[in-house]
């Protein structure tokens, strides 16, 4: 567009070049001609975003083509009101015009009196699933909010953590920003916030942190439960039943001990979530959660007993895994880990689930020759589970002298470790590959070099900001 053009001048130029008059153009787009004429001669421009869309389409332009001019005329040269800003932000979000959202917000953040409206706009977009646009607006709230102790500021940090929790590279940095504000959240949000922190640090294998936040989670759930009037209040509306958070706190604390080899301590906490039926007034969903955690307790207790060397429990464990296939990845990891540490082979057990293992390999197939990479799980916590499985499976293959198959599993573990930004996982994968590099095929070496390049480029991109891929 030419310099100093306006929405009006663009419309007038279109009418002149197309050879139609204003009335014909108005009728063709479904606008009343006097109304369009009045809009074009108003100063400032009084056109709504809906009317702008009709005009844009009538001129044969792409959606959002006139947004930049509209921003200048409606929001930069006048004192805009939210009756016009809100619909415009919503439309920008629908079209992924995030540049336009930022441009509007850059003028609004100068006025801290607009913070409430900006926050409400972000909440509305998040409810509609427009997460990236909502994240931009929450960041604007953070920049605008003058009161560090405000609940709105805490919720904005929490929302950003929610939005980016599945991003293995952004989630840790955003979590660090959220942590100081976690105690300022409403309890319903605080439950989910603490659970997300617990899961994040489990993925990072920072077990002391897992223990700390799991304790906070179960204590908060207990405090809410003891304040019976609070959790019975219709305004208290967490995303899951209270028993779920109570039990998750115990489950992750038990897991933090298990991963540190403190099996007896872990058993004590497993016993706590093995039966949560003592909680009063459980509804149907709550009762189903009690049963689910009872199943988790059985699985994790069997897992620990096998890790302790009691191989007489393997048959029972296999029956359990057949009954609950969602627990199979963790179960196979337990069996492989026990096998590797006790220097025994368990082919007869792995053969039982050969079809599932083959499917896991397909679902996590690394792209060869720059093909698209397909992953079955996107959640970092699930990627973490598969990263452990493939690493233990690689060690098992190396013990059997199945070197190329072992390297294939190393590459899968390496990829998943990078996806979730796991320092330990990446270092272990690189060490295993280098130890067995002489046996790698050209294709395997090419994939390995490609992932290494991604690691390097990611760290280089962060370095100017004082961050590092290994900080998390």
Image (spheres, helix red, strand yellow):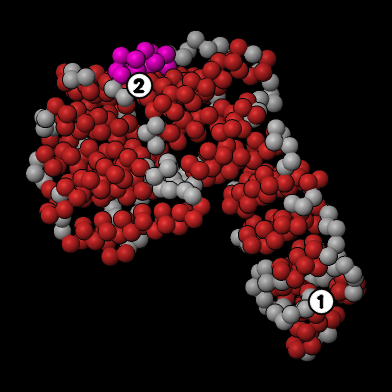
Q: Secondary structure at mark 2?
A: helix
Nearer the observer: mark 2 or 1; the answer is 2
At horizontal 53% and vertical 38% (from top left) the residue drawn is 176
Can residue 386 be seen here?
no
The residue lying toward the viewer, choosing from 439 and 316, is 439
User: Which quadrant of the view contains residue 55?
Assistant: bottom right
**Residue drawn 32% across the image and 64% down it:** 370
- Left or right: 384, with 40 as reference point: left
Residue that label 2 marks? 257
| Residue at the (28%, 22%) spot, across then down | 261
> Looking at the picture, how far across and down is residue 9, in whole percent?
80, 80
How crowded is the residue under tag 2: few (<14 C-alpha within 10 Å), some, or many (20+)? Answer: many
**Secondary structure under the numbered disc 1 in the rendered image:** helix
Q: Nearer the viewer, residue 411 or 178?
A: 178
Residue 433, percent across and down? 20, 49
**Magenta segment: does it hold 425?**
no
* Overall secondary structure of the magenta section: helix
Q: Residues within 10 Å of mark 1 (few under 14, many from 20)?
A: some
Q: CA distance from mark 2 to mark 1?
A: 68 Å
Q: In which quadrant will I find the N terminus?
A: bottom right
Residue placed under numbered mark 1 in the picture: 8
Viewer can see residue 16: yes
Using the image as rendered, state which of residue 303 and residue 233 is in the foreground: 303
Q: Which residues are magenta?
A: 262-274
459 left or right, relative to 60: left
Question: In the displayed structure, would residue 28 be above or below residue 375?
Answer: below
């Amino acid at each position: 567009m030419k310099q100093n053009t306006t929405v009006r001048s663009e419309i007038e130029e279109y009418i002149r070049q197309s050879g139609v008059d204003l009335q014909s153009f108005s009728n063709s787009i479904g606008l009343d001609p006097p109304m369009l004429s009045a809009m074009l001669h108003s100063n400032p421009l009084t056109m709504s975003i809906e009317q702008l869309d009709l005009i844009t389409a009538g001129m044969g332009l792409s959606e959002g083509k006139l947004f930049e001019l509209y921003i200048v005329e409606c929001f930069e040269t006048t004192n805009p009101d939210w009756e016009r800003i809100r619909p415009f932000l919503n439309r920008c979000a629908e079209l992924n015009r995030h540049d336009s959202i930022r441009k509007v917000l850059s003028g609004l953040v100068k006025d801290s009196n607009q913070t409430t409206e900006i926050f409400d706009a972000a909440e509305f977009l998040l409810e509609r699933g427009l997460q990236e646009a909502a994240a931009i607006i929450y960041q604007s709230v953070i920049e605008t909010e003058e009161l560090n102790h405000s609940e709105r500021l805490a919720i904005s940090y929490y929302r950003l953590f929610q939005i980016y929790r599945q991003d293995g590279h952004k989630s840790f940095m955003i979590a660090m920003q959220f942590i100081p504000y976690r105690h300022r959240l409403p309890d319903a949000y605080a439950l989910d916030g603490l659970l997300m922190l617990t899961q994040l640090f489990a993925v990072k294998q920072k077990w002391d942190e897992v223990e700390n936040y799991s304790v906070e989670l179960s204590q908060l759930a207990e405090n809410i439960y003891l304040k019976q009037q609070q959790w019975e209040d219709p305004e208290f509306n967490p995303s899951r039943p209270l028993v779920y958070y109570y039990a998750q706190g115990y489950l992750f604390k038990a897991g933090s001990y298990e991963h540190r080899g403190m099996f007896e301590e872990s058993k004590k906490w497993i016993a706590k979530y093995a039966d949560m039926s003592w909680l009063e007034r459980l509804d149907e969903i709550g009762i189903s959660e009690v049963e689910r955690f009872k199943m988790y307790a059985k699985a994790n207790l069997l897992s620990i007993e096998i890790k302790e060397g009691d191989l007489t429990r393997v048959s029972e464990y296999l029956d359990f895994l057949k009954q609950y296939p969602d627990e199979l990845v963790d179960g196979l990891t337990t069996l492989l880990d026990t096998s590797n540490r006790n220097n025994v082979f368990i082919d007869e057990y792995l053969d039982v689930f050969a079809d599932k293992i083959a499917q896991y390999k397909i679902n996590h197939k690394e792209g060869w020759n720059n093909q698209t990479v397909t992953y079955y799980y996107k959640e970092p916590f699930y990627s973490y589970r598969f990263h452990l499985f493939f690493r233990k499976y690689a060690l098992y293959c190396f013990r059997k002298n199945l070197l190329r198959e072992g390297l294939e599993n190393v590459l899968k573990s390496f990829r998943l470790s990078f996806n979730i930004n796991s320092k330990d996982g990446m270092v272990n994968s690189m060490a295993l590959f280098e130890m067995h590099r002489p046996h790698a095929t050209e294709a395997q070496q090419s994939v390995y070099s490609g992932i290494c390049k991604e690691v390097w480029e990611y760290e280089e991109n962060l370095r100017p900001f004082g961050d590092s891929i290994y900080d998390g």
